[in-house]
Image (tube, rainbow, N blue to C red):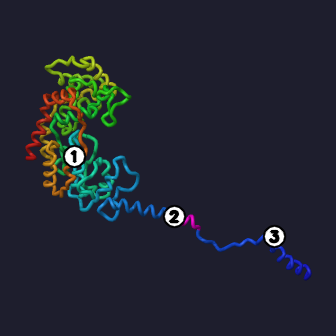
Amino acid sequence: ASSAAAAAAAAAPAAAAPLMGVAAPVHPPPTPRPLLNLLLASLLASASAATSSIALQTTDTRPPDGCTGPRPRWGTSLCWYNVERSPLLTNVTWLHVPKCGSSFARLVFRGACGAVPANKTHVDFVEASAMHPIIQLHCKSAFHRFQSWHAALSPSEASRCGRGLVCVTTLRTTWKRVESGFHHNLHDCQWMQDAHRLNQDYGPKYGGPSFYKTYTEDHVRLYASCVSTCMTRMLTGLPCGRCSGTLSRAQAARCVERVWSDAFSGIEASAGEGGTAALNISDYVRFASRTRSKRADPLHDPDPPPDTRRAMRTLSRFAFVGLLDNWSWTVHQFGRRFGVPLLPSDYKVLRAGSKSRSSSPRQKMAEQTLRAFSFAADDALVSATSDSLG
């Protein structure tokens, strides 16, 4: 037994000995990996630089809420706002009449939330919907409704204006508003858009020919008739454009025929460029009817006469009504009315409306046609607003 143990002890060093001509491996203690450390340091430095660059765009030491995450298509304008005080207003309801100044949304947002841009002389346009992250975090009580789209004032909201809701809006000289809408892909007249392959958000559809190279005075008159009472309708719970909503095929047909009659009452359709061949009532009736519901209320009048008195009563309960045609005075009066410290950027119209910049005979014809068109209901609202602004 002792001899076996001795033999094992002698064999152990021999087994551990290196092979002939091969050096024994050396195993140093674990050390940090230089490449990994370098990568981590680079990532940390990049993150720090990014945070610093955002902070430089603000008046605070930290980026305001809403600056993180993917940047929307309208850029970094949200990063230029800081909420510096408590909301000045509560339950603001903004009625956004088409082509009447989206820039007013920025002024309402600043006033209600106490938001201040870092650059006080210039700020990019921001859609109202893009401001919701800041509103939800800092001034949720400031707004009852703050939307980019053009929803009418509901009967419930109309009854609460001045009685719990702070209703605000801006209006515009009617023929100018209609002119802007006409050049913005026939804004708010759905059945005319469909007939001429236009979309008010994305322009021409289906690769069709340009409507604006061929339109006639008849097209201008028909569109004007479609949206002639837009402001009045929106104050009384109706969509801006006539023949909108849930209608039966028969209702849609009768509605378009009424719009056609109002457009050409007392005159004959022109026989100029394109003539009546380019403007056929049956085409518009077809496009107005094909998307309407067959289950609509047959007793519902799809195109009631404009209720100017009701619209006037509702407008009189608004906390503020501005006029785009007198923008500087509108901004001044808004700041004075609600105690909003005004900035140079507040006086800039950041989103000019759609209008042909050419002085072509067709453009001049459209303007002359709209200047002569009757917009009695909406003109009364504009006149009252002008008087109230002083």
Mark drawn on residue 349: 1
Look at discs 3 and 2 and give the one toward the viewer: 3
Query: How far from the left and from the top, in percent, is residue 147?
Result: 28, 46
Mark drawn on residue 158: none
Query: How far from the left and from the top, in percent, is residue 64?
Result: 33, 59
Q: State left or right for residue 70 relative to residue 171.
A: right
* Residue of label 2: 40
Q: Which residues are magenta?
A: 33-37
Could you tell me if the residues under marks 2 and 1 are in contact, i.e. CB atoms within 8 Å? no
Mark drawn on residue 21: 3
Q: CA distance from mark 2 to mark 1?
A: 47 Å
Seen from the viewer's position, the closer of residues 118 and 286 is 118
Seen from the viewer's position, the closer of residues 328 and 226 is 328
Q: Is residue 270 above or below residue 100?
A: above
- Name which residue lies at 14% across and 44% down: 326
Q: Amino acid at mark 2?
A: Leu
Determine the main secondary structure of the stretch shown in magenta. Answer: helix
Question: On the image, which quarter does residue 359 sit in?
Answer: top left
Q: State left or right for residue 289 relative to residue 315.
A: right
Precedes in sequence: disc 2 or disc 1: 2
Q: Amino acid at mark 1?
A: Val
- Crowding near pointer 3: few (<14 within 10 Å), some, many (20+)? few
Precedes in sequence: disc 3 or disc 2: 3
